[in-house]
Amino acid sequence: MFIQRASIAGFRSIVHSTIGKCGKVNVLYGENNAGKSNVLAALETLFKVEKVEELESRVGGFIRGELSNFVDNFTLGTNVKRGNIIKITAQVGLDDNDLVRMPKFDAFIKANGIFKRGHNQWVVVEVEVESTGHALARRTVRKAVVNNHVMFDFESSDRYFPNLKVDSKTRLDAGEEVFSCLINSFAIIRAERFLRNEKVEDEALYPLLQNGYFKRFLLELSLSREPRFKVFEEIVKNISAKPFNFGQIRPVVEDGNVELLVKDSQGRELMVARVGTGVQQIIVLVSHIASSSARIIGIEEIELNLSPSLQYRLLELLKDMVGKSPNVIDQLFITSHSYHLSMREDVCLYAVAKNDTGETNVSWGPAAVSGLRKHFDFGLFKLPRTRSWRS
Protein backbone atom coordinates (compact mmCIF):
# COMPACT_ATOMS: atom_id res chain seq x y z
CA MET A 1 0.00 0.00 0.00
CA PHE A 2 1.29 3.45 -0.83
CA ILE A 3 0.06 6.98 -1.39
CA GLN A 4 0.62 8.09 -4.97
CA ARG A 5 -1.00 11.51 -4.72
CA ALA A 6 -2.83 13.57 -2.10
CA SER A 7 -4.77 16.84 -2.10
CA ILE A 8 -5.30 18.79 1.14
CA ALA A 9 -7.59 21.79 1.62
CA GLY A 10 -8.44 23.77 4.76
CA PHE A 11 -6.10 21.94 7.13
CA ARG A 12 -4.15 24.25 9.48
CA SER A 13 -1.92 26.45 7.29
CA ILE A 14 -2.70 24.44 4.15
CA VAL A 15 -5.45 26.33 2.32
CA HIS A 16 -4.99 24.08 -0.69
CA SER A 17 -1.97 22.05 -1.74
CA THR A 18 -1.15 18.81 -3.52
CA ILE A 19 1.66 16.30 -3.28
CA GLY A 20 2.09 14.01 -6.25
CA LYS A 21 4.33 11.37 -7.76
CA CYS A 22 5.13 10.00 -4.32
CA GLY A 23 7.80 7.32 -4.01
CA LYS A 24 8.74 4.80 -1.34
CA VAL A 25 10.76 7.39 0.63
CA ASN A 26 9.57 10.99 0.51
CA VAL A 27 11.30 13.98 2.12
CA LEU A 28 9.29 17.14 2.87
CA TYR A 29 11.94 19.85 3.12
CA GLY A 30 11.40 23.34 4.49
CA GLU A 31 12.25 25.84 7.19
CA ASN A 32 10.81 25.79 10.68
CA ASN A 33 7.09 26.65 10.77
CA ALA A 34 6.74 26.07 7.02
CA GLY A 35 3.94 23.53 7.54
CA LYS A 36 5.80 20.25 6.98
CA SER A 37 4.23 18.53 9.98
CA ASN A 38 0.82 19.79 8.86
CA VAL A 39 1.12 17.65 5.74
CA LEU A 40 1.81 14.54 7.85
CA ALA A 41 -1.06 15.34 10.24
CA ALA A 42 -3.47 15.74 7.31
CA LEU A 43 -2.47 12.37 5.84
CA GLU A 44 -2.93 10.77 9.26
CA THR A 45 -6.43 12.28 9.49
CA LEU A 46 -7.35 10.68 6.17
CA PHE A 47 -6.88 7.20 7.63
CA LYS A 48 -7.78 7.92 11.23
CA VAL A 49 -10.46 6.19 13.30
CA GLU A 50 -11.18 7.51 16.78
CA LYS A 51 -14.82 7.31 17.87
CA VAL A 52 -17.28 5.05 16.07
CA GLU A 53 -20.54 6.79 15.19
CA GLU A 54 -22.22 4.20 12.97
CA LEU A 55 -22.31 0.99 14.98
CA GLU A 56 -24.25 -0.95 12.35
CA SER A 57 -21.19 -1.03 10.09
CA ARG A 58 -18.01 -3.01 10.72
CA VAL A 59 -16.01 -0.03 9.48
CA GLY A 60 -18.46 2.62 10.64
CA GLY A 61 -15.79 4.61 12.44
CA PHE A 62 -13.83 4.93 9.22
CA ILE A 63 -16.86 5.96 7.18
CA ARG A 64 -18.15 8.44 9.73
CA GLY A 65 -16.90 9.18 13.22
CA GLU A 66 -15.93 11.95 15.59
CA LEU A 67 -12.45 13.33 16.26
CA SER A 68 -11.74 14.97 19.62
CA ASN A 69 -9.47 17.98 20.32
CA PHE A 70 -9.51 18.76 16.62
CA VAL A 71 -10.74 22.33 16.32
CA ASP A 72 -7.24 23.84 15.96
CA ASN A 73 -6.70 21.86 12.77
CA PHE A 74 -9.11 24.03 10.76
CA THR A 75 -7.51 26.67 8.57
CA LEU A 76 -6.45 29.90 10.25
CA GLY A 77 -4.08 32.01 8.13
CA THR A 78 -3.14 35.68 8.02
CA ASN A 79 -5.78 36.57 5.43
CA VAL A 80 -7.90 33.45 5.77
CA LYS A 81 -10.84 33.09 8.13
CA ARG A 82 -11.12 29.86 10.05
CA GLY A 83 -12.98 27.39 7.88
CA ASN A 84 -15.33 24.72 9.11
CA ILE A 85 -14.60 22.01 6.53
CA ILE A 86 -11.38 20.17 5.71
CA LYS A 87 -11.12 18.18 2.50
CA ILE A 88 -8.48 15.51 1.99
CA THR A 89 -8.27 13.27 -1.05
CA ALA A 90 -5.65 10.60 -1.71
CA GLN A 91 -4.91 8.13 -4.46
CA VAL A 92 -3.73 4.90 -2.83
CA GLY A 93 -2.05 2.06 -4.68
CA LEU A 94 -2.73 -1.56 -3.71
CA ASP A 95 -0.28 -4.20 -4.91
CA ASP A 96 -0.55 -8.00 -5.06
CA ASN A 97 0.52 -8.33 -1.41
CA ASP A 98 -2.41 -6.13 -0.39
CA LEU A 99 -4.85 -8.19 -2.44
CA VAL A 100 -3.74 -11.34 -0.61
CA ARG A 101 -5.01 -9.67 2.59
CA MET A 102 -8.32 -8.83 0.87
CA PRO A 103 -9.56 -12.06 -0.76
CA LYS A 104 -13.20 -10.94 -1.07
CA PHE A 105 -12.27 -7.63 -2.70
CA ASP A 106 -9.74 -9.37 -4.95
CA ALA A 107 -12.31 -11.89 -6.18
CA PHE A 108 -14.95 -9.18 -6.58
CA ILE A 109 -12.96 -6.83 -8.83
CA LYS A 110 -11.75 -9.76 -10.96
CA ALA A 111 -15.27 -11.13 -11.37
CA ASN A 112 -16.72 -7.75 -12.33
CA GLY A 113 -14.04 -6.52 -14.73
CA ILE A 114 -12.63 -3.86 -12.39
CA PHE A 115 -9.25 -5.53 -11.87
CA LYS A 116 -6.22 -3.93 -13.59
CA ARG A 117 -3.98 -6.68 -14.86
CA GLY A 118 -0.23 -6.11 -14.50
CA HIS A 119 -0.75 -2.89 -12.56
CA ASN A 120 -1.50 -1.64 -9.09
CA GLN A 121 -5.15 -1.32 -8.13
CA TRP A 122 -5.91 2.38 -7.53
CA VAL A 123 -8.25 3.52 -4.78
CA VAL A 124 -9.16 7.23 -4.55
CA VAL A 125 -10.64 8.20 -1.18
CA GLU A 126 -12.31 11.56 -0.50
CA VAL A 127 -12.69 12.59 3.15
CA GLU A 128 -14.34 15.65 4.69
CA VAL A 129 -13.92 16.79 8.28
CA GLU A 130 -16.51 19.23 9.58
CA SER A 131 -16.24 21.27 12.76
CA THR A 132 -19.06 20.49 15.20
CA GLY A 133 -17.92 22.81 18.02
CA HIS A 134 -16.60 22.09 21.51
CA ALA A 135 -13.23 20.97 20.03
CA LEU A 136 -14.96 18.11 18.19
CA ALA A 137 -15.12 17.36 14.48
CA ARG A 138 -17.02 14.88 12.35
CA ARG A 139 -15.00 12.94 9.79
CA THR A 140 -16.85 11.47 6.80
CA VAL A 141 -15.75 9.43 3.79
CA ARG A 142 -17.72 11.11 1.01
CA LYS A 143 -16.64 8.92 -1.88
CA ALA A 144 -14.24 6.15 -2.85
CA VAL A 145 -13.36 5.02 -6.36
CA VAL A 146 -11.53 1.83 -7.42
CA ASN A 147 -9.89 1.83 -10.85
CA ASN A 148 -12.34 4.55 -12.00
CA HIS A 149 -15.36 2.58 -10.70
CA VAL A 150 -17.38 4.02 -7.82
CA MET A 151 -16.81 1.78 -4.80
CA PHE A 152 -18.56 3.91 -2.19
CA ASP A 153 -20.88 6.93 -2.27
CA PHE A 154 -21.97 8.36 1.07
CA GLU A 155 -24.91 10.19 -0.50
CA SER A 156 -26.28 7.11 -2.25
CA SER A 157 -28.93 4.92 -0.69
CA ASP A 158 -27.01 1.96 -2.08
CA ARG A 159 -23.54 3.00 -0.93
CA TYR A 160 -21.22 0.18 -2.08
CA PHE A 161 -20.58 -0.25 -5.81
CA PRO A 162 -23.95 1.36 -6.64
CA ASN A 163 -23.44 1.01 -10.40
CA LEU A 164 -23.03 -2.77 -10.36
CA LYS A 165 -25.93 -5.24 -10.47
CA VAL A 166 -24.51 -7.61 -7.88
CA ASP A 167 -26.15 -8.69 -4.62
CA SER A 168 -25.70 -6.09 -1.90
CA LYS A 169 -23.91 -8.35 0.60
CA THR A 170 -21.18 -9.23 -1.90
CA ARG A 171 -20.67 -5.54 -2.71
CA LEU A 172 -20.68 -4.63 0.99
CA ASP A 173 -18.12 -7.30 1.90
CA ALA A 174 -15.76 -6.24 -0.90
CA GLY A 175 -15.95 -2.52 -0.07
CA GLU A 176 -15.64 -2.92 3.69
CA GLU A 177 -12.59 -5.14 3.21
CA VAL A 178 -10.83 -2.24 1.49
CA PHE A 179 -11.81 0.20 4.25
CA SER A 180 -10.66 -2.26 6.91
CA CYS A 181 -7.25 -2.35 5.21
CA LEU A 182 -7.03 1.48 5.14
CA ILE A 183 -8.01 2.06 8.78
CA ASN A 184 -5.11 3.59 10.76
CA SER A 185 -2.65 2.56 8.07
CA PHE A 186 -0.76 5.88 8.46
CA ALA A 187 1.13 6.64 11.69
CA ILE A 188 3.35 9.56 12.72
CA ILE A 189 6.51 9.35 14.82
CA ARG A 190 6.48 12.73 16.54
CA ALA A 191 9.51 14.93 17.13
CA GLU A 192 9.07 14.58 20.92
CA ARG A 193 11.17 11.42 21.19
CA PHE A 194 13.42 11.43 24.20
CA LEU A 195 13.94 9.07 27.12
CA ARG A 196 12.89 9.73 30.69
CA ASN A 197 13.41 8.06 34.03
CA GLU A 198 10.88 5.25 34.30
CA LYS A 199 9.75 3.18 37.27
CA VAL A 200 8.14 -0.25 37.21
CA GLU A 201 4.56 0.09 38.37
CA ASP A 202 2.28 -2.56 39.83
CA GLU A 203 -0.17 -2.23 36.96
CA ALA A 204 0.35 -3.96 33.64
CA LEU A 205 3.12 -2.63 31.42
CA TYR A 206 1.97 -0.14 28.85
CA PRO A 207 1.89 -1.57 25.31
CA LEU A 208 2.28 1.95 23.89
CA LEU A 209 5.42 3.47 22.48
CA GLN A 210 5.43 6.99 23.87
CA ASN A 211 7.42 9.27 26.14
CA GLY A 212 7.58 7.92 29.66
CA TYR A 213 6.78 4.35 28.66
CA PHE A 214 9.49 3.56 26.11
CA LYS A 215 11.88 1.56 28.30
CA ARG A 216 8.99 -0.34 29.84
CA PHE A 217 7.72 -1.08 26.36
CA LEU A 218 11.08 -2.62 25.39
CA LEU A 219 11.16 -4.53 28.69
CA GLU A 220 7.72 -5.98 27.97
CA LEU A 221 8.81 -6.97 24.45
CA SER A 222 11.96 -8.67 25.76
CA LEU A 223 9.90 -10.79 28.17
CA SER A 224 7.23 -11.71 25.62
CA ARG A 225 6.74 -14.84 23.57
CA GLU A 226 6.51 -15.01 19.82
CA PRO A 227 5.61 -13.04 17.77
CA ARG A 228 6.23 -10.00 19.98
CA PHE A 229 9.67 -11.22 20.98
CA LYS A 230 10.61 -11.26 17.29
CA VAL A 231 9.91 -7.52 17.20
CA PHE A 232 12.42 -7.05 20.03
CA GLU A 233 14.97 -9.17 18.15
CA GLU A 234 14.45 -7.03 15.05
CA ILE A 235 15.08 -3.85 17.06
CA VAL A 236 18.27 -5.27 18.61
CA LYS A 237 19.52 -6.45 15.21
CA ASN A 238 18.99 -3.07 13.54
CA ILE A 239 20.83 -1.24 16.33
CA SER A 240 23.74 -3.65 16.71
CA ALA A 241 24.44 -4.44 13.04
CA LYS A 242 25.29 -2.25 10.06
CA PRO A 243 24.88 0.59 9.34
CA PHE A 244 25.08 1.60 13.05
CA ASN A 245 27.00 -1.05 15.04
CA PHE A 246 25.97 0.69 18.27
CA GLY A 247 26.01 -2.59 20.22
CA GLN A 248 23.51 -4.94 21.84
CA ILE A 249 20.72 -3.29 23.82
CA ARG A 250 18.79 -4.84 26.70
CA PRO A 251 16.34 -3.46 29.27
CA VAL A 252 16.93 -4.19 32.97
CA VAL A 253 15.19 -3.39 36.25
CA GLU A 254 17.25 -1.99 39.12
CA ASP A 255 15.73 -0.67 42.38
CA GLY A 256 12.35 -0.32 40.73
CA ASN A 257 13.73 1.68 37.79
CA VAL A 258 13.77 0.48 34.20
CA GLU A 259 17.08 1.14 32.46
CA LEU A 260 18.28 0.45 28.94
CA LEU A 261 21.84 -0.88 28.61
CA VAL A 262 24.03 -0.90 25.51
CA LYS A 263 26.92 -3.40 25.22
CA ASP A 264 29.75 -2.48 22.87
CA SER A 265 32.05 -4.83 20.92
CA GLN A 266 34.46 -5.01 23.90
CA GLY A 267 31.69 -6.27 26.17
CA ARG A 268 31.33 -3.03 28.14
CA GLU A 269 27.80 -2.01 29.10
CA LEU A 270 26.64 1.58 29.49
CA MET A 271 23.26 3.04 30.30
CA VAL A 272 21.66 4.48 27.19
CA ALA A 273 21.82 7.97 28.74
CA ARG A 274 25.62 7.73 28.47
CA VAL A 275 25.82 6.88 24.78
CA GLY A 276 24.57 10.20 23.41
CA THR A 277 21.25 11.70 22.37
CA GLY A 278 21.77 10.77 18.71
CA VAL A 279 21.96 7.06 19.51
CA GLN A 280 18.86 7.38 21.70
CA GLN A 281 16.96 9.06 18.87
CA ILE A 282 17.78 6.22 16.49
CA ILE A 283 16.82 3.54 19.03
CA VAL A 284 13.43 5.20 19.48
CA LEU A 285 12.87 5.59 15.72
CA VAL A 286 13.83 2.01 14.92
CA SER A 287 11.63 0.72 17.76
CA HIS A 288 8.63 2.70 16.54
CA ILE A 289 8.95 1.38 13.01
CA ALA A 290 9.62 -2.24 13.96
CA SER A 291 6.61 -2.36 16.28
CA SER A 292 4.14 -0.33 14.21
CA SER A 293 1.08 -1.92 12.66
CA ALA A 294 0.75 0.99 10.21
CA ARG A 295 1.86 0.41 6.63
CA ILE A 296 2.81 4.04 5.94
CA ILE A 297 4.99 5.94 8.42
CA GLY A 298 5.53 9.68 8.80
CA ILE A 299 8.60 10.88 10.73
CA GLU A 300 8.92 14.43 12.03
CA GLU A 301 12.38 16.03 11.92
CA ILE A 302 14.30 12.86 11.19
CA GLU A 303 17.65 14.65 11.65
CA LEU A 304 16.92 15.57 15.29
CA ASN A 305 20.21 15.34 17.27
CA LEU A 306 21.90 13.47 14.42
CA SER A 307 25.19 14.33 12.72
CA PRO A 308 25.28 14.36 8.90
CA SER A 309 26.94 10.93 9.01
CA LEU A 310 24.18 9.45 11.18
CA GLN A 311 21.52 11.11 9.04
CA TYR A 312 22.96 9.32 6.02
CA ARG A 313 23.17 5.96 7.79
CA LEU A 314 19.67 6.25 9.23
CA LEU A 315 18.17 6.97 5.83
CA GLU A 316 20.02 3.98 4.39
CA LEU A 317 18.50 1.75 7.08
CA LEU A 318 15.00 3.16 6.55
CA LYS A 319 15.24 2.60 2.80
CA ASP A 320 16.25 -0.99 3.49
CA MET A 321 13.32 -1.50 5.91
CA VAL A 322 10.67 -0.41 3.40
CA GLY A 323 8.90 -3.46 2.02
CA LYS A 324 10.71 -6.01 4.17
CA SER A 325 9.45 -8.47 6.80
CA PRO A 326 8.71 -9.12 9.61
CA ASN A 327 6.79 -5.84 9.94
CA VAL A 328 6.28 -4.52 6.43
CA ILE A 329 6.50 -0.76 6.00
CA ASP A 330 5.40 0.20 2.51
CA GLN A 331 6.18 3.91 2.44
CA LEU A 332 7.84 6.71 4.41
CA PHE A 333 7.11 10.45 4.58
CA ILE A 334 9.87 12.40 6.34
CA THR A 335 9.96 16.07 7.34
CA SER A 336 13.35 17.73 7.46
CA HIS A 337 15.23 21.01 7.32
CA SER A 338 18.57 19.24 6.89
CA TYR A 339 20.63 20.41 3.94
CA HIS A 340 22.27 16.98 3.75
CA LEU A 341 18.94 15.16 3.28
CA SER A 342 17.75 17.68 0.72
CA MET A 343 20.76 16.81 -1.46
CA ARG A 344 19.81 13.12 -1.76
CA GLU A 345 18.90 11.89 -5.21
CA ASP A 346 17.51 8.54 -4.00
CA VAL A 347 14.36 10.01 -2.41
CA CYS A 348 11.36 11.95 -3.68
CA LEU A 349 11.93 15.53 -2.58
CA TYR A 350 9.24 18.13 -1.85
CA ALA A 351 9.75 21.78 -1.00
CA VAL A 352 7.41 23.12 1.70
CA ALA A 353 7.17 26.87 2.23
CA LYS A 354 4.78 29.57 3.40
CA ASN A 355 3.80 32.50 1.20
CA ASP A 356 3.33 36.10 2.29
CA THR A 357 -0.17 35.40 3.64
CA GLY A 358 0.97 32.50 5.81
CA GLU A 359 -0.38 29.74 3.59
CA THR A 360 1.65 26.55 3.16
CA ASN A 361 2.49 25.44 -0.37
CA VAL A 362 4.04 22.12 -1.38
CA SER A 363 5.93 21.77 -4.65
CA TRP A 364 7.83 18.96 -6.31
CA GLY A 365 9.81 18.39 -9.48
CA PRO A 366 11.10 21.54 -11.23
CA ALA A 367 9.14 23.81 -8.87
CA ALA A 368 10.80 22.21 -5.83
CA VAL A 369 14.24 22.58 -7.42
CA SER A 370 13.63 26.28 -8.05
CA GLY A 371 12.44 26.89 -4.50
CA LEU A 372 15.30 25.03 -2.87
CA ARG A 373 17.91 26.69 -5.08
CA LYS A 374 16.64 30.10 -4.05
CA HIS A 375 16.73 29.04 -0.39
CA PHE A 376 20.29 27.72 -0.45
CA ASP A 377 21.76 30.38 -2.72
CA PHE A 378 20.63 32.95 -0.18
CA GLY A 379 22.73 31.27 2.51
CA LEU A 380 26.08 29.56 2.74
CA PHE A 381 25.37 26.72 0.32
CA LYS A 382 25.35 26.76 -3.46
CA LEU A 383 23.35 24.14 -5.32
CA PRO A 384 24.98 22.71 -8.46
CA ARG A 385 23.30 24.18 -11.53
CA THR A 386 23.51 20.90 -13.45
CA ARG A 387 22.28 18.61 -10.68
CA SER A 388 19.54 16.17 -11.60
CA TRP A 389 16.68 15.87 -9.11
CA ARG A 390 14.23 13.05 -8.59
CA SER A 391 10.57 13.95 -8.40
Image: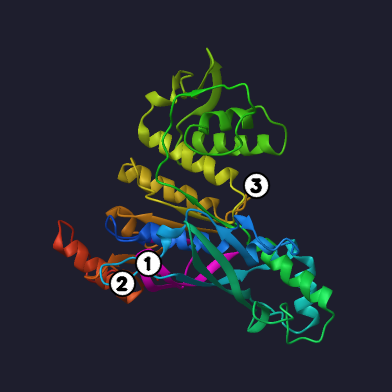
Q: Please give left or right for residue 379 compared with residue 272 in the image.
A: left
Residue 79 lies, with reference to residue 29, above or below; the image says below
Q: Please give left or right for residue 320 compared with residue 353 in the image.
A: right
Closest to the observer, 53 or 98: 53
Dot 2 or dot 1, earlier in sequence: 1
Q: In the rendered image, which residue does mark 1 sit on?
A: 75
Residue 102 lies, with reference to residue 260, above or below; the image says below
Q: In the rendered image, which residue does mark 2 sit on?
A: 80
Numbered disc total: 3
Report the quarter where the N terminus lies. bottom right
Residue depicted at 44% across the width and 20% down the height: 270
Residue 291: quarter of image: top right
SS for callout 1: loop
Task: Spot the residue most to the front.
Answer: 134
> Which residue type does callout 1 highlight?
Thr
Residue 326, which numbered label? 3
Residue 346 lies, with reference to residue 280, above or below; the image says below
Return the x and y of residue 110 as percentages of the image width and height.
77, 78
Q: Main secondary structure of the magenta part?
A: strand
> Which residue type does callout 3 highlight?
Pro
Please indicate, yes or no, whether residue 201 appears anywhere in the rendered image.
Answer: yes
